[in-house]
Image: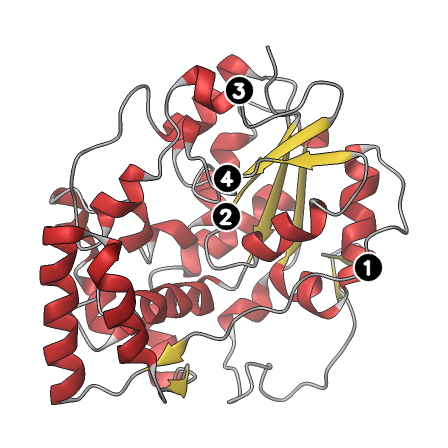
């Protein structure tokens, strides 16, 4: 029986694909050839349908035990990356029941920026029918009730305080490594060394992570509306065979993702403020910068660029 020794469990749109690719370059680590098997998200087959694009996602789900074990190599330190495990409390319990000794890696991203990136991803693919991120977030409860998959849960995916509080009822803290998305991008060598030390493999081997693709942001035009309608129709009929070329057409010559205005950010922060306070209490780290405005480059307003952020006790914080 070969099961993973560690899991990258969160969060979506926080460079987990780049991290998975980087860790696969370490000679002592084996990362699953399917980056996101989703094994612990269900006790059996995944649902047959959900929101736009969900059927294709569910078809990628590795849910049978033998297929899951086949992803790993005996004699290696094995890992996989499914960034929805942190969000899904039942998945946390399934992991604990099957591999309670597993080490867990969590990449946290500013929840407003994460939600915006998530929405842009689906908007640019033609799957998101609402052209305003604030309005789309307001529809989340209805979408969850209708069975749309977790990737549509823009707000709920970013409530890290609730998720980590539950995780720590199952796993001791020394089995969980938390760091920030920005540190992985801005300080890759240092952050990768932290991960290698956590996993007990030699440091100094991994120094870079692959460059992230910046999601294009097609304009909310009649052409976008028409093509998006075709994407969602094609999704129901034939899956990615038809949707992939249509999505590429949507993104052709599109602008990079536009930053949120402070008005939008402030409105979305109402969903997260209480949870950020819980996150700080749970981790004993300072995330108050997430409550502040950001400039058009994504930096904090009124501050100079710095290196690693600091925890409450002055130690570098990832």
For marks 4 and 3, the one nearer the N-term is 4
Q: Nearer the viewer, mark 2 or mark 1?
A: 1
- Tell me the quarter of the image containing the N terminus: top right
* Residue 45 quadrant: top left
Label for residue 278? Answer: 2
Image coordinates of residue 315 in percent, x first then y, are 83, 56
| Location of mark 1 (residue) | 207
Q: Which residue is drawn at 32% across and 74% down?
A: 248
Task: Categorize mark 1 by other alpha carbons within 10 Å: few (<14), some (14-19), many (20+).
Answer: some
| Location of mark 3 (residue) | 69
| Location of mark 4 (residue) | 34
Task: Categorize mark 3 by other alpha carbons within 10 Å: few (<14), some (14-19), many (20+).
Answer: some
* Cα distance between the residues tagged 4 and 2: 34 Å
On the question of residue 152 being in view, the answer is yes
* Cα distance between the residues tagged 2 and 1: 33 Å
- In what element is the residue under mark 3? helix
Above or below, 183 against 302 in this view is: above
* Cα distance between the residues tagged 3 and 1: 29 Å
Image coordinates of residue 108 in percent, x first then y, are 56, 54
- In what element is the residue under mark 1? loop
Give the camera-side residue of 193 and 260: 193
Image coordinates of residue 186 in percent, x first then y, are 72, 70
Q: Do the residues labelled 2 and 1 touch (CB within 8 Å)?
A: no
- In what element is the residue under mark 4? loop
Q: Do the residues labelled 4 and 2 touch (CB within 8 Å)?
A: no
- In what element is the residue under mark 2? helix
* Residue 57 quadrant: top left
* Cα distance between the residues tagged 4 and 3: 12 Å
For marks 2 and 3, the one nearer the N-term is 3
Q: Are marks 4 and 3 in contact (CB under 8 Å)?
A: no
For marks 1 and 4, the one nearer the N-term is 4
Q: Is residue 164 left or right of residue 232?
A: right
């Amino acid at each position: 029986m070969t099961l993973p020794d560690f899991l990258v469990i969160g969060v979506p749109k926080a460079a987990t694909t780049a991290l998975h690719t980087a860790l696969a370059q370490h000679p002592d680590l084996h990362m699953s050839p399917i980056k996101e098997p989703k094994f612990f998200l269900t006790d059996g087959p995944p649902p047959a349908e959900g929101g736009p694009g969900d059927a294709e996602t569910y078809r990628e789900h590795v849910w049978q035990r033998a297929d899951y074990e086949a992803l790993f190599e005996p004699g290696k330190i094995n890992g996989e990356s499914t960034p929805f495990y942190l969000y899904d409390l039942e998945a946390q319990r399934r992991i604990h029941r099957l591999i309670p000794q597993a080490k867990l890696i969590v990449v946290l991203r500013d929840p407003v920026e994460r939600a915006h990136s998530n929405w842009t991803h689906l908007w640019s693919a033609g799957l998101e029918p609402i052209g305003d991120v604030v309005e789309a977030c307001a529809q989340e409860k209805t979408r969850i009730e209708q069975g749309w998959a977790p990737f549509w849960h823009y707000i709920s995916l970013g409530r890290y305080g609730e998720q980590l509080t539950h995780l720590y009822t199952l796993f001791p803290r020394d089995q969980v490594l938390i760091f920030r998305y920005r540190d992985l991008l801005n300080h890759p060598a240092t952050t990768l060394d932290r991960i290698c030390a956590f996993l007990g493999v030699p440091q100094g081997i991994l120094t870079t992570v692959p460059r992230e693709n910046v999601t294009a942001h097609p304009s909310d035009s009649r052409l976008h509306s028409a093509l998006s309608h075709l994407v969602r129709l094609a999704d129901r009929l034939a899956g990615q065979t038809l949707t992939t070329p249509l999505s590429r057409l949507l993104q052709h010559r599109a602008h990079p993702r536009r930053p949120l205005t402070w008005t939008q950010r402030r409105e979305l922060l109402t969903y997260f403020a209480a949870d950020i306070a819980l996150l700080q209490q749970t981790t004993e780290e300072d995330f108050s910068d997430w409550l502040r405005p950001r400039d058009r480059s994504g930096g904090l307003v009124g501050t100079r660029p710095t290196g690693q952020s600091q925890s409450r006790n002055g130690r570098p914080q990832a």
